[in-house]
Image (cartoon, rainbow, N blue to C red):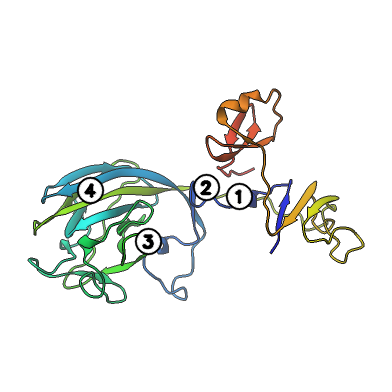
Amino acid sequence: MSVIIFFLLSQNNLLAGQFENQFLTANFSEQVFSTSIPPTVNPAPPEVCTEKIEGLPFSASTATTTTVIQPATTYGFMFDIYKLDNSFTLTINGKPIANKEIEFQSAGTDGVNIRFADGSKYEGGVGTIYSLTGTPAAPLLRVAISPTGVVTMFGSKVSGGPLFPLELFNGANFNNVTWNKTMPNTTVISQKQVGPTNISGRGFGLNEIPCICFNPANTATPGQDTKVGITLFNRAGSENTDNWPMTRKSGHLALESNTKGFVVSRIAKADLGNIAVPQEGMMVFDTTDKCLKIYSDGEWSCFSTPTCP
């Protein structure tokens, strides 16, 4: 496998790698928040692009009721739970997310009413809910509110593990709720007291943003040959059947390797001013802000927000 780097960057390069830090891209809408929808029944709608909006932490213990005002978001909201013992009710703008308290423990309660879609439960094949923990990177539970107010839940079977779809049963059902897109949302967490009782976690939401737009590619005429290249594959030159780097079109320089990468100048943010006459389009890696920066319109900016040309 080769790694090829051009000094001609396309807008495709802007999008690559930004899912984790800045943008979430969905090729479907409601399916982002639901468990599974047969594609033959619901064809995928157009792509939706979103950015993450941080919410507030929440916690409760000893059956206290906690109210947290979460921000407005246009494309739904998530409640990530890191620790739970052993049930909870979440009310959003006056409407509980379920018709019953969501119960993970059988002793001293009306019975467990939530299980994994595969039929396993936290007391049946999976550890007890209070023996497991989650983190911001790998929550124990996730309550997802879709843009239309549909509620779904996901859970991990081990501490720090992946999330799997959950479903209610034993007379419990999810309610549809109203999530405000332009004004704050009032969320209330309460618990029935059965032995030690606690819950903690944090919320975050998604705002819909314009997707990256692209100019149509030039397919009418081939680009000019790239004249200069560095390769570790011993195949450069016109006498080689690969015709490399000339076969890589429209670049000033082509780099090729399967063991090495391309590193631009690394400069601390405080030292960017030492570049006496920065040129439009100049690139460096800012070791303070941990991003590739481009000089444009008189300032250095992280190369992290794709926009339309």
Q: In which quadrant of the rendered view does residue 268 lie?
A: top right
The residue lying furthest to the right in this view is: 239
Nearer to the camera, 101 or 254: 254
Q: Which residue is mark 3?
A: 33
Could you tell me the amino acid type at mark 1? Cys
Marker disc for residue 210:
2
In the rendered view of the protein, which quadrant contains the N terminus?
bottom right
Could you tell me the amino acid type at mark 3? Phe
Q: Is residue 285 left or right of residue 151?
A: right
Q: Are marks 1 and 2 in contact (CB under 8 Å)?
A: yes
Q: Residues within 10 Å of mark 2 (few under 14, many from 20)?
A: few
Distance from disc 3 to disc 4, alpha carbons, whole Å, reads 19 Å
Distance from disc 1 to disc 2, alpha carbons, whole Å, reads 8 Å
Could you tell me the amino acid type at mark 4? Asn
Residue 290 percent location from the top left of the image: 54, 40
Q: Secondary structure at mark 2?
A: loop
Determine the residue positioned at 36% across, 56% down.
138
Residue 160 percent location from the top left of the image: 35, 59
Q: Is residue 5 visible?
A: yes
